[in-house]
Image (cartoon, rainbow, N blue to C red):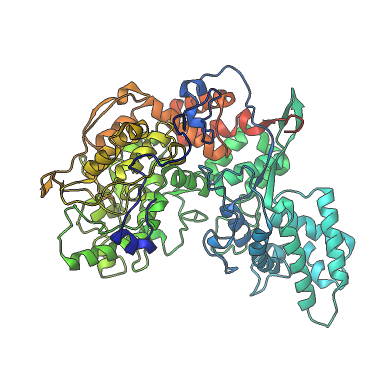
């Protein structure tokens, strides 16, 4: 494991365990067959992995339809927070993104997976205070303490607080609106509406009139709280109705929810709890056009779906800041001009895994770089600058993660050769060092992780910097990615983390987990005459280690030109003590794409070779499928994967075309009816 910031003393004092080395197998049950793929494509002692399916089988269409069955999916942390709070971090309700427990299964590769996720009593205990506050937003007219525009605009709802005894028609109209636009984000079924109406009648009957509005406000808050805990509020359906041959077609609202949650982490037509100045949310609610397409049946039209994807995919519209980047009027000038929708941005965040950087402690992030002056004062200044790059607390500039967000958004919004651009572009977005709103170390050293001390003006043009060809090329050489997949110290075996990621996420390969091979992940002690590569080779040279490490180490060694925090090294440990030039050279062999075999100079050349690989492109298609479908691919998805690849190629590497091909496919719109007992 890698030590976190709160474990600095333990790291400095002691025995750092990292994924990247091995010692003698631990005593215990026989492990000679552990991790060996079984005949059905699984792995004994491990969970099944789609990476065990030969890739050529997944891109050979034989006309079969996807065998994925119908399912019920619990909404996740991001979706629930946005629906209820109206903001991705801290909404006006006073609760944060981190206050709800609807985390996806930690074993899931993406947060969009929802296999077997449930809601238990402990979750309800955490949710209750939040939905109680949310209930107050629906409990009366638009006032200083209530920010629900809908209650001001829709006069038909006023009878709920203006009438001492609301009529049955008034109650059902109010509840129908509440369920469709504030809780379930689809029209309620008769049984759902009947149950909530009966509960509402009982709550209203308990009121004790005292001449004030408070009893009614309290009653309606109770009603909304109860509605927010109904199964339809916490789970969404992909059940459909029968069409033919054991298949079902998803309903209009099922398709609308699937599309909006994939693109935007928010439900169709969700009413804005605070609209001004969030101009992206109209009076129809967030993604109101997708809700309209569900109402009129347009959601079934590939042309309509393609248009909706175009509208909500991303762009450069300065008025759009209903985004994962949390752009606001004050923040936009110091960010890149490109934006991505929540769903698209989160796919790249989760696939690349670069948001981990803020959680991984780095001892002397500048070590072995040109900015390592060996002085204690220098260490402190560099540490302060690094912390600011992670948190942005002391300055007015973007964080390291946001800079990566902007790098990715530029490549994806331009939508030409997206994968190649992501892996090879030298144009990075950096924080300004001049006129940035803070005069001090907060922005003074922020260019150094990228290898520059240049003064950067506070303009969008100046922040976009073309970095040297020999130093950086794309996301795998970005400090945010390197640090996220690096260790705590400069001589840690970060190569293993990085090589494992490349193997699994760009080559769709399989590396058995440590639990299946039963070894202790540990390298030898730090030594002035041993660099990271030497320590790693010493620890993993045994035959029992090479079964796994031969899959990871060679792909990670090219990244040794960077240290644990992503700084470009200018020197490295020499075997005889002292220093030598950093070494990223390696000879690759036995890779699934033969074009990748052979000598590689460093991570820059590796990135360029990966970008040119058709095998890597297909793995990228698979990763896209997984995130947006919220499940693993299998052989029956081959025709859709082929269609996605063809769309990407025919549109010059367009990610938008990739999504259109998926989101208008039979795999997206239909399901297999489950067999009896399934």
Q: Which residue is drawn at 66% across and 70% down?
A: 146
Q: Is residue 286 left or right of residue 623?
A: right
Q: In this view, does 186 lie above or below 373?
A: above
Q: Which residue is drawn at 27% across and 35% down?
A: 541
Question: What number of labels is visible?
Answer: 0
Q: Is residue 453 above or below residue 674?
A: below
Residue furthest bottom as drawn: 210
Q: Quadrant of the C terminus?
A: top right
Quadrant for residue 513, please give it. Answer: top left
Q: Which residue is drawn at 43% across and 40% down?
A: 518
Provide residue 322's location: percent of width, then percent of height. Answer: 52, 55
Provide residue 494's location: percent of width, then percent of height. Answer: 31, 45
Taking depth in this image into account, of 521 and 218 the one nearest to the observer is 521
Quadrant for residue 471, please give it. Answer: top left
Q: Residue at x 66, y 38 (%)?
A: 299
Q: In this view, does 241 lie above or below 409?
A: above
Provide residue 74's location: percent of width, then percent of height. Answer: 65, 48
Q: Is residue 67 left or right of residue 554?
A: right
Quadrant for residue 8, please give it. Answer: bottom left
Taking depth in this image into account, of 642 and 597 the one nearest to the observer is 597
Provide residue 328's location: percent of width, then percent of height. Answer: 46, 61
Q: Can residue 657 be seen in this view?
A: no
Q: Is residue 64 visible?
A: yes
Q: Is residue 478 left or right of residue 221?
A: left
Taking depth in this image into account, of 198 and 518 the one nearest to the observer is 518
Q: Is residue 101 above or below residue 239?
A: below
């Amino acid at each position: 494991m890698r030590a976190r910031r709160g474990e600095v003393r333990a790291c400095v004092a002691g025995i750092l365990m990292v994924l990247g080395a091995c010692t003698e197998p631990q005593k215990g049950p026989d492990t000679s067959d552990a991790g060996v793929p079984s005949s059905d494509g699984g792995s004994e002692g491990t969970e099944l992995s789609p990476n065990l399916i030969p890739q050529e089988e997944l891109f050979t269409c034989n006309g079969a339809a996807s065998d994925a069955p119908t399912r019920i999916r619990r909404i996740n942390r991001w979706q629930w927070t946005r629906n209820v709070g109206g903001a991705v971090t801290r909404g006006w309700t006073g609760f944060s993104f981190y206050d709800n427990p609807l985390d996806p299964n930690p074993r899931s590769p993406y947060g969009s997976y929802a296999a077997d996720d449930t809601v238990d009593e402990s979750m309800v205990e955490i949710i209750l205070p939040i939905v109680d506050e949310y209930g107050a937003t629906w409990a009366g007219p638009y006032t200083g303490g209530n920010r629900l525009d809908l209650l001001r605009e829709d006069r038909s709802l006023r009878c709920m607080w203006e009438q001492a005894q609301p009529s049955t028609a008034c109650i059902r109209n109010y509840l129908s609106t509440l369920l469709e636009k504030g809780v379930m984000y689809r029209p309620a079924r008769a049984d759902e509406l009947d149950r909530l109406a009966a509960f509402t009648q009982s709550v209203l009957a308990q009121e004790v009139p005292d001449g004030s509005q408070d009893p009614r406000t309290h009653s309606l808050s109770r009603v909304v709280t109860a509605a927010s805990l109904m199964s339809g509020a916490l789970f969404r359906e992909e059940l459909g109705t029968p069409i033919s041959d054991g298949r079902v077609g998803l309903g209009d609202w099922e398709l609308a929810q699937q599309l909006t949650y994939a693109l935007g982490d928010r439900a169709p037509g969700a009413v804005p709890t605070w609209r001004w100045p969030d101009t992206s949310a109209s009076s129809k609610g967030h993604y109101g056009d997708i809700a309209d397409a569900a109402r009129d049946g347009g959601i079934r039209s590939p042309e309509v779906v393609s248009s909706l994807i175009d509208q909500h995919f991303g762009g450069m519209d300065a008025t759009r800041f209903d985004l994962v980047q949390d752009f606001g009027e004050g923040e936009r000038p110091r960010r890149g001009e490109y934006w991505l929708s929540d769903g698209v941005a989160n796919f790249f965040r989760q696939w690349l895994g670069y948001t981990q950087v803020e959680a991984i402690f780095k001892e002397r992030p500048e070590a072995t770089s040109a900015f390592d002056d060996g002085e204690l004062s220098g260490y402190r200044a560099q540490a302060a600058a690094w912390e600011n790059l992670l948190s942005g607390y002391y300055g007015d500039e973007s964080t390291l993660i946001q800079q990566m967000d902007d790098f990715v958004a530029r490549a994806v919004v331009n939508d030409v050769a997206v994968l190649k651009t992501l892996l090879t572009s030298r144009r990075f977005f950096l924080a300004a060092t001049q006129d940035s709103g803070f005069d001090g170390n907060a922005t003074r050293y922020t260019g150094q992780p990228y290898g520059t001390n240049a003064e950067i003006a506070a303009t969008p043009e100046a922040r976009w910097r073309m970095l040297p060809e020999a130093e950086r090329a794309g996301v795998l050489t970005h400090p945010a990615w390197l640090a996220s997949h690096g260790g705590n110290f400069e001589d840690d075996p970060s190569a293993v983390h990085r090589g494992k990621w490349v193997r699994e996420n760009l080559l769709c390969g399989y590396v058995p987990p440590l639990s299946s091979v039963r070894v202790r992940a540990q390298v030898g002690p730090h030594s002035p005459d041993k660099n990271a590569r030497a320590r790693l080779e010493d620890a993993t040279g045994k035959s029992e280690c090479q079964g796994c490490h031969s899959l990871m180490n060679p792909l990670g060694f090219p990244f040794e030109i960077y240290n644990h925090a992503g700084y470009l090294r200018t020197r490295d440990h020499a075997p005889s003590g002292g220093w030598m030039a950093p070494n990223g050279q390696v000879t690759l062999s036995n890779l699934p794409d033969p074009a990748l075999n052979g000598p590689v100079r460093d991570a820059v050349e590796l990135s360029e070779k990966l970008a040119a690989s058709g095998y890597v492109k297909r793995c990228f298609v698979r990763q896209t499928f997984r995130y947006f479908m919220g499940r693993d691919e299998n052989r029956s998805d081959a025709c859709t994967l082929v269609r996605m690849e063809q769309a990407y190629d025919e549109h010059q590497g367009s990610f938008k075309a990739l999504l259109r091909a998926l989101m208008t496919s039979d795999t997206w719109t239909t399901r297999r009816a489950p067999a009896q007992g399934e």
